[in-house]
Image (cartoon, rainbow, N blue to C red):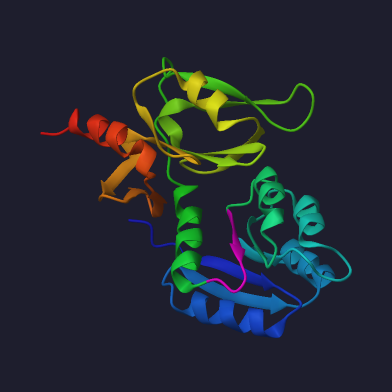
Amino acid sequence: MNTKKYRCLIVDDEPPAIRLLENYISKVSFLEKVGSTTSALEALQIIESQEIDLVFLDIQMPELSGIQVSKIVKGKTKIIFTTAYPQFAIESYDLHAIDYLLKPSEFERFYEAVLKIRKNETPKEVTTNDTFLFVKTDGKNNYEKVYQNEICYIEGLKNYVAVHLLDKVVITYNTLKHIEESLGNSHFVKVHKSYIVAIKHIIKTDSITVYIKEKALPIGDTYKKNFFEKIESYKL
């Protein structure tokens, strides 16, 4: 059983946002707040001088943006971005952040995000004969290998697609239709115009929602018949 306490730093230029996160952190047994600051420059000093496991990092701040801070610390700590602007989501995924929270976030959404730090440290079983794809990321010839057995669900984001894996999210400039065709096996099913799910990672479902890990995804009317036919084929 993982009993580790994750040392957290809050970086936000709005004191009310800091207080909200402090309250949320105090409710989670595996989190420990070790500091907070309204200064991005001070945050860099803290990260350099202390052992910080997780930073709640505001994106829009004076001096340096959260995006810039993330690029400077480069993997020295895990990051959950906080922002009032959803258009930053794609860039935050590109920087391999654990998650991003839209302000003001509810506790349920906060808890869903912080659970991911534990998953990132859970060893994954990867077999040599597992099916994989090379997903194009940023840059002309940049690709990332993605094992199909690690895909939880795939999300369409206008001109981009977010491939949600067990421990991270990979963003690619592509269409959901193209990704669906590339998967080419029966272990994935489209449940909504914006979502494809991996059947093996479904926890439960009802008539309108499918649950993948802690994420609740809608089932679109157009896709219900095919989805439940797939589910029936796995029924005991």
The structure residue drawn at horizontal position 31% and vertical position 39%, both measured from the top left corner, is: 224
Up the image or down, 74 lies above or below 177; here it is: below
**Residue 109 on image: x %, y %:** 48, 65
Work out whether 70 lies above or below 34: above
* Residue 193 pos. (x, y %): 48, 39
Front-lying residue, 215 or 167 = 215
In the rendered image, the residue lying farthest to the left is 236
Residue 82 seen in the figure: yes
Out of 221 and 158, give the one closest to the viewer. 221
Residue at the top extreme of this rendering: 129
At 41% from the left and 72% from the top, the residue drawn is 29
Tell me where the magenta segment starts and ends, as one range.
99-105
Residue furthest right as drawn: 63
235 over 85 or under it: above or below: above
Q: Where is the N terminus found, in terms of image quarters?
A: bottom left
* Image quadrant assignment for residue 231: top left
- The quadrant in which residue 80 appears is bottom right
Q: Nearer the viewer, residue 188 or 94?
A: 188
Counting from the top left corner in percent of width and height, residue 220 is at 39, 44
User: At 37% across and 31% down in the image, what residue appears?
Assistant: 189
Question: Taking 144 as reference, is 218 left or right?
Answer: left
Where residue 204 appears, as percent x and y from the top left, is 26, 48
Near-viewer residue (79 or 108): 108
The stretch drawn in magenta includes residue 103: yes
Query: Which quarter of the figure is the C terminus placed in?
Result: top left
Decide if residue 53 is in sight here.
Answer: no
Is 220 in the magenta? no
